[in-house]
Image: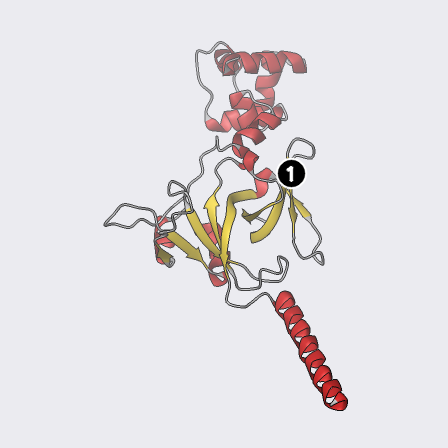
Amino acid sequence: MDLASRIRTLRKAAGWTQQSLADELGLKRSALGAYEEGRAEPKLATLIALARHFGMSLDAFVLGESEEDRMMRRVIGGDLRVLSVPVDRSSERERVAIVPVRAAAGYLSGYGDPEYMEGLDHFNLPVKELPQDATYRMFQIEGESMLPIPHGSYILAHYEENWSKAGGMRPYVVVTRDHGVVFKRVENRLDTHGDYLLISDNLDFAPYRVFPEDVVEMWRARAYLAFDWPTPAFAGMERIQGTLDQMREDLRTIQKKLD
């Protein structure tokens, strides 16, 4: 159904005459008639007023899609997404930008700005185990919600254009409008709840939901760089080593008594 037919169909379904709807919108009846007959195109302000009057989003009104269709179009990458990537000028190959904790707040407004991205540190990624046709970025994380990966670690992740593929309890760096840059496991609940559930490995942190309209970017985690050994496992090895040393000392003492 084209826009002209949609205006006419919605008007009749709502029980309005051309004159009554034109009066509501501050239009001439002849102008509304021209829109319904396809002889003229409404200006943007008129489209917004019509969509609001019919209780619809502008996308749903102009494109004739449902809210579910609109959401899915955004999820699969049908909407325009600006992704700026630093490039090696000599080889024209993409480089990996590093987003440290101190830059995370600015990333929300600068992720689409080429000058901002060029201002971040970046490097080439000569790792053959990772697909070379993907776009990678490295994010520094803070806090203890994903222990044993410690605070201050850097997460290497590749860009996920189709968010419907995200999930499966795999780890992702998710950039959201409300929570900023977060590192979580993602459960995809689009088909049942219309959202994603973000889950921490540290059970002291409760899961929470985010909706597709709040998501800016998704990056699937592939590796991490840390500068502290995992503390729980290391502490456990220390205890085991201490117990073994004590057992050896006790055996020596018993051996001396027997001698």
Q: Could you say which quadrant of the image residue 98 lies in?
A: bottom left
Q: Is residue 176 above or below residue 23?
A: below
Query: SS at mark 1?
Result: strand
* Residue depicted at 53% across the width and 64% down the height: 152
Q: Residues within 10 Å of mark 1 (few under 14, many from 20)?
A: some
Left or right of 146 on screen, residue 88 = left
Residue found at the very far front of the displayed protein: 259
Q: Position of residue 92 (x, y in %)?
A: 27, 45
Left or right of 244 on screen, residue 62 = left
Q: Is residue 101 above or below residue 177?
A: below
Q: Could you say which quadrant of the image residue 191 lies in?
A: top right
* Residue depicted at 69% across the width and 35% down the height: 193
Q: Nearer the viewer, residue 150 or 45?
A: 150
Task: Report the number of discs.
Answer: 1
Q: Amino acid at mark 1?
A: Asp
The C terminus is located in which quarter?
A: bottom right
Residue found at the very far top of the displayed protein: 37
Q: Position of residue 186 (x, y in %)?
A: 61, 44
* Residue depicted at 69% across the width and 49% down the height: 207
Q: Nearer the viewer, residue 59 or 35?
A: 59
Q: Nearer the viewer, residue 52 or 61?
A: 61
Q: Is residue 28 above or below residue 205?
A: above
Left or right of 124 on screen, residue 184 = right
Left or right of 186 on screen, residue 81 = left
Q: Position of residue 3 (x, y in %)?
A: 51, 16
Query: Can residue 236 be seen?
Result: yes
Q: Which residue is mark 1?
A: 195
